[in-house]
Image (cartoon, rainbow, N blue to C red):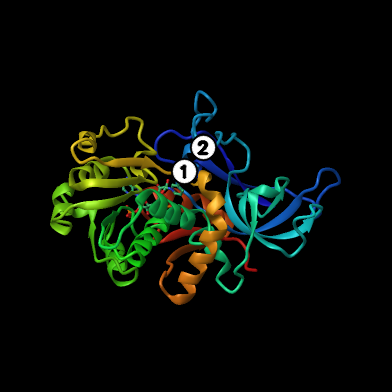
Amino acid sequence: NKRVVLKRHVTGFPTEEDMEVVVDTVPLRVPAGSPAMLVQNLYLSCDPWMRGRMSKHDDGGAAETAPDFVVGETLVNFGVGKVIDSTHPAFKASDLVWGMSGWEEYTLVSQPESLFKVNHTDLPLSYYTGVLGLTGLTAYASFMELGRPKRGDFVFVSAASGAVGQIAGQLAKIAGCYVVGSAGSDEKVDLLKTKFGFDDAFNYKSEADLAAALKRRLPDGIDIYVDNVGGATLDAALLNMRWGGRVVVCGMISQYNLNEPYGLRNMYCIIPKALRVEGFNATGYFHMYSRFEEEMARYIREGKVVVVQDVVEGIESAPAALIGLFSGKNVGKQLVALARE
Ligand code: NDP
């Protein structure tokens, strides 16, 4: 059983040397005792939130979504796998599942509530790391519930070619909105316009003045900003929001590796523009999962939502794939394929 462990706690940008792939053996049956499932992990999801857990917080991460990872222990995140043995009545061998698992080839899962059954086996199984998993749910629930889109709304999405962004943008088009995206390379900008159907897009790295770049593309202002990055982009969006606009804060990836966070200058805009700025945390939206899964599977089958994934092979590739998220190396949803079904 190969697994990725945390070698040391991280400050600043994570590196491959912060993690290590180690090998041990595991029994391929659930040991006697409390009911559990032994899962063979087929795909691992790489998610920016893992970075927060790689730091050492004074409170052990109590104020974060989940506790700090422990040095020497296996990293944990969402993944897709196959049950190979189960003593739990809710799961049987050969069930395909997604949910919380270890960054390893085999995981013993004792909490059935951390796993969901894969219902749409006609769609690519790897989609359950993204569009049909955490990041799809994030895009859907944040945009629909916090964004409250109306036909004709002007929408801006940052990190728009990524896992959350590409889905949020396409949902905005389905809702009849005008959508502009930002991304960190010309290749990604091209993808936004030609593949995901954004009305306009720009490379934020080549714009000296982000507020002016937004003003040029959205001269009447922004009704909904789906924020995946925070920092200077959020500041520029605040200046360009329309009266009554909604800022849906899904993530602030530009801040995760900074010791000194960027100081926002334009928060005052929330008063004269009567803005609603709301943080989103997917852990509070899993009650919507079934409805979301059905709707998203239908969009995919109908071709209304297309998916771009960045797949690397083998668990040895996982640390580099994870840290690549913080330099924009990934084009689309980043995942690691361990074994095919
Ligand atoms: P992505 O697939 O979008 O990958 C991360 C991308 O972020 C990179 O490709 C890069 O794209 C961009 N990026 C990296 N560093 C910076 C930076 N300094 N400034 C601007 N952009 C940067 O990741 P996800 O879609 O999985 O996640 C997107 C956001 O959503 C993250 O902030 C994440 O934490 C958040 N999230 C929140 C959830 C919640 O429940 N609240 C759940 C899931 C995700 P580019 O080349 O365009 O710069």
Q: Is residue 42 left or right of residue 37?
A: left
Crowding around mark 1 (Cα neighbors within 10 Å: few <14, some 14 to 19, many 20+) is some
The tag earlier along the polypeptide, 2 or 1, is: 2
The foreground one among 166 and 2 is 166
Q: Is residue 194 above or below residue 274?
A: below
Q: Is mark 2 within 8 Å of ligand 1?
A: yes
Q: Is mark 1 within 8 Å of ligand 1?
A: yes
Q: Nearer the viewer, mark 2 or mark 1?
A: 1
Q: Which quarter of the rendered picture does the C terminus lie within? A: bottom right
Query: Farthest residue toward the right?
Result: 32
Q: What's the amino acid at mark 2?
A: Thr
Q: Which residue is mark 2?
A: 65
Q: CA distance from mark 2 to mark 1?
A: 8 Å
Q: What's the amino acid at mark 1?
A: Asn
Q: Is residue 11 above or below residue 97?
A: above
Q: Determine whether the residue tagged by mark 1 lies in a helix, strand or loop.
A: loop
The foreground one among 7 and 208 is 208
Q: Which residue is mark 1?
A: 281
Q: Is residue 278 above or below residue 165?
A: above
- In the rendered image, residue 19, in percent from the top left (x then y), is placed at 54, 43
Q: Determine whether the residue tagged by mark 2 lies in a helix, strand or loop.
A: loop
Residue drawn at (82%, 53%) of the image? 87
Q: Quadrant of residue 186?
A: bottom left
